Image (tube, rainbow, N blue to C red):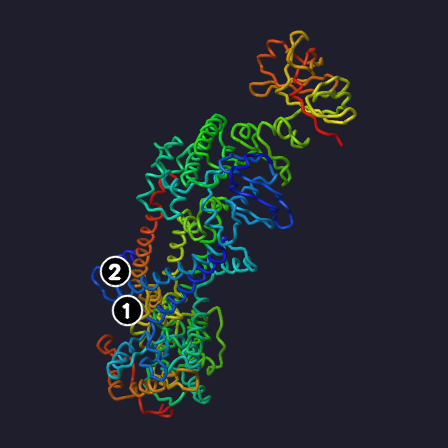
Amino acid sequence: MTGNDQARSVLELVGVRVQYGGTVAVEVDRLEVLEGEILVVIGPNGSGKSSLLRTMGLLEPPATGAIRFKGQPVDPRGVLTARRQMASVFQDPLLIDATVFKNAALGLGFRRMRRADLAPRVRPWLDRLGIGHLAERRARTLSGGEAQRTALARALVLRPALLLLDEPFAALDQPTRETLIVELGRILRHDRITTVMVTHDRGEAMSLGDRVAVLMAGRIQQVDQAARLFRSPVSEEVARFVGVETIVDGEVIAAEDGLATLNAGGQRVEVAAAARPGDRVRLCLRPEDVSLAIREEVAASSSRNHLTGTITDLLAQGAHVRVTVDCGFPLMALVTRRSVEDLRLAPGSSVVAAFKATAAHVLPRA
Amino acid sequence: MGDRSCRRRAGGVGLALLLGVCLVLASGSAVCAQGVPSRTLILSTTTSTQDSGLLDVLVPMFERQTGYTVKTVSVGTGQALALAARGEADVTLAHAPALEKKYVAEGKMLNRRLVMYNDFVLVGPEADPAKILGEKSAVAALKRLAEAKARFVSRGDKSGTHTLELGLWKEAGITPGPPWYIESGQGMGATLGIADDRQAYTLTDRATLLAFAKRVALRIMVEGDRPLLNIYSVMEVNPANGPRVNAAAGKAFADFVVSREAQEAIKTFGVAKHGQALFVPVAGKKDEDF
Amino acid sequence: MSLLLDALRQAGALLIGGDGEVWAVLWLSLRVSGTATLVALGLGIPAGVALALGRFWGRNLIVSAVNTGMGLPPVVVGLFVSLALWRSGPLGFMEILYTPAAIIVAQAVIASPIVTGITLAAVQNVPAKFRLQLLALGASRPQMIRIVLREARLPMLAAVMAGFGGIISEIGASMMVGGNIKGHTRTLTTAMVLETSKGNFDVALALAIVLLVLVFLVNWALTSVQQRGSAGR
């Protein structure tokens, strides 16, 4: 889709179909991984993410299609050579019953590196991943985070042309996960390691991904830069998956200078979009983009849209609260607990929901 | 994905292993060059013959004299003769005249020659409930046993001893059965042990009785009767019975066993240990002489 | 009880007194069963790995056959091997019947399904994800198999012990194909049977004790290797 045309292609899938027996798990017309980028593949469970990753890692031959690695087609005899320029980390660290050092050096052993050459190559990576002090520890005594760091070191020490990660942080607790995401991101960016990461966590996709691909039911729905994907999903399915919670019917009543006025649920909404009067659309709003106020004049003036409504539901979610407002259509807002307390929000309260014209997004309605 | 190359490698490893196994086997085998007669011969005999210990004297003597190596296979009489009939042995030494004559008549065995005999005795508990002590006729003694329903332990394993015993019952016109008639299905030593234990009568060869004399409290009840003689003969295996029958070696052993030197050794066997000889050498005699 | 004590004393006397025959019999048992175990490992481990990792027509049939083979009575194997090694049999030309080589063959046949079956289970027990991870780190298939077997070393050593233990104490096959020939194919177990049938229960018991001690020592050595570095599991 987009991306720097001058960046080289590390991996390219063309017309690739992955099948298990008679069932098609993944079908990709074209997907390219560019050098130095972090491509995150997100999708719901069962969408075929892991199958796609295994195919990209040349671990499972596709039923049909062509795979090019570094611009060259991969033929059956060259698979091992190509695979040796890649490395994978999975959700389960899958370490061998040996020391951390031996685990990290495992891949180098497959490539027949001499014993003496291992330490100078492996130790710096153990240090970089914060486990240098655990080098002689047996793998089965490690915590989940330490084990996954070992698995990462094991992959990174190989200096792969392509790094493949399959939900590497899914099994870890929240604080460990957050720390590791940051550390990993730093390493990947600093060394410009081409990475494909599969995850179902939107937050990880946002933090790490240069580009994000959405995989649903085996097909790639959209590949875009992270910010753009979340702002402008191409379909309702993708929209829901990337966290757009308010999706309602609307009709364009006026359009001028890139600003469209809609009638949605009886309310007048202004959206920054290219549309023509009479277009039937679906209005999309992310809850984070909606702010709540008690009175009109206090509402943020930079927002073009101020809708008055009644609170119908409040749902606490971690440090935030999900507020459902009925303003002619159900509108979701995400506010801090503090705000809820300060504004004394409760079911039945009357509020003004405000959001910018640029925050709203429209999709064509069939 | 390297599957084919791996399978080829696995196949190569398997083939190498198979060759290795063959080498191991070959290292344990005798010379098997075509056309050169083997210096090994297989003697098939019975367990009681082996257990008597006589072969431990005769075989080394033969090996020293001729340079042959003897493989002695000691199994039940039926199996010993059946193996020979299939050509899986070169010479037999057994003591079941009726069965042996049958094989000779069929042409499976050649040149049956008598070698020696030992005798069987009817033994029983000191108390002698059937009162057969001193009885001259074995058949008569058995009739008295059956009448008294005195406990009797049989080999029950189709051995030479068992065959002889069944012949005696047949002549007595009796079909023995439980509860007083017990079949042990085991060797002579074990059967004696059972008889001793159950205070029962049994038929045994003198050699085994002598060997077990100290261990059992059984007394000889009947001895010396003609039907109780246990005649051993040697037979050569017909080379037509199977491939690789070593006829020359078989003949050499058969000739040896009836030779003067072997017969002398037989005559003196057991004297030192038990005070009396276990066998009586009879080479040269015929069945009719008994 | 006194019989047992006598036997213990006799066992010691036989060994320490340097009874040549007992040592010869012991050495033969060890040599024959040891070789047969090695052959069984050489055949069984690759077979077990191939069955565990392969997907081919008839695989389930072969696995069932292996499982059946694990429980084969040794005397049945002895009978079939005899048939093959008889002069009139297909392998008669090798003339190895009634030699230690024949016992090695029969015992290898007995132990191979055991080794195959345990290897198969051990390799299947290593999760498929693990194998995938190894491949994903650039392992070739042989390299992957080597690591998998190393991870499965506990059950693998159990396979060695089970294979060896099963054949050093078997009688049926040794009797049938070996012939229990003194000084040539008389093993600890066949000698035991002979002495028992002769009524020499004390000698038989002594031999039994020798056999038990031998098997225990071998298993002790193998267990030490197996459990090495596994403390604190």
Determine which residue is flagged by label 2.
C10
Instruction: Farthest residue to the left: give it.
Output: C17
**Judging from the image, what secondary structure is the residue with disc 1 in?**
loop
Against C141, residue B138 (above or below) is: below
**Chain label for disc 2:** C
Judge whether residue A264 can be spotted in this image: no
Against B233, residue A176 (above or below) is: above
Residue C197 in the image, given as x and y percentages of width and height: 35, 68
Spatial CA span between label 1 and label 2:
19 Å
Residue C110 in the image, given as x and y percentages of width and height: 43, 62
Please rate how many residues cluster around mark 1, counting C-alpha atoms within 10 Å: few if below 14, some from 14 to 19, many from 20: few
Q: Nearer the viewer, residue A76 or A180?
A: A76
The residue that appears at 23% across and 78% down in the rendered structure is B271
Give left or right: position of B151 versus B27: right
**Judging from the image, what secondary structure is the residue with disc 2 in?**
helix
Give left or right: position of A96 versus A114: right
Type of amino acid at the residue the image marks with label 1: Lys
Q: Nearer the viewer, residue A195 or B215?
A: A195
Please rate how many residues cluster around mark 2, counting C-alpha atoms within 10 Å: few if below 14, some from 14 to 19, many from 20: some
**Residue C1: which quarter of the image?**
bottom left
Quadrant (top left, top right, bottom left, bottom right) of the C terminus of chain A: top right
Determine which residue is flagged by label 1.
B214
Give left or right: position of A220 versus B269: right
**Residue B255: which quarter of the image?**
bottom left
Against B263, residue A53 (above or below) is: above
Instruction: Farthest residue to the right: give it.
Output: A278
**Chain label for disc 1:** B
Type of amino acid at the residue the image marks with label 2: Gln
Q: Which mark is residue B1?
A: none
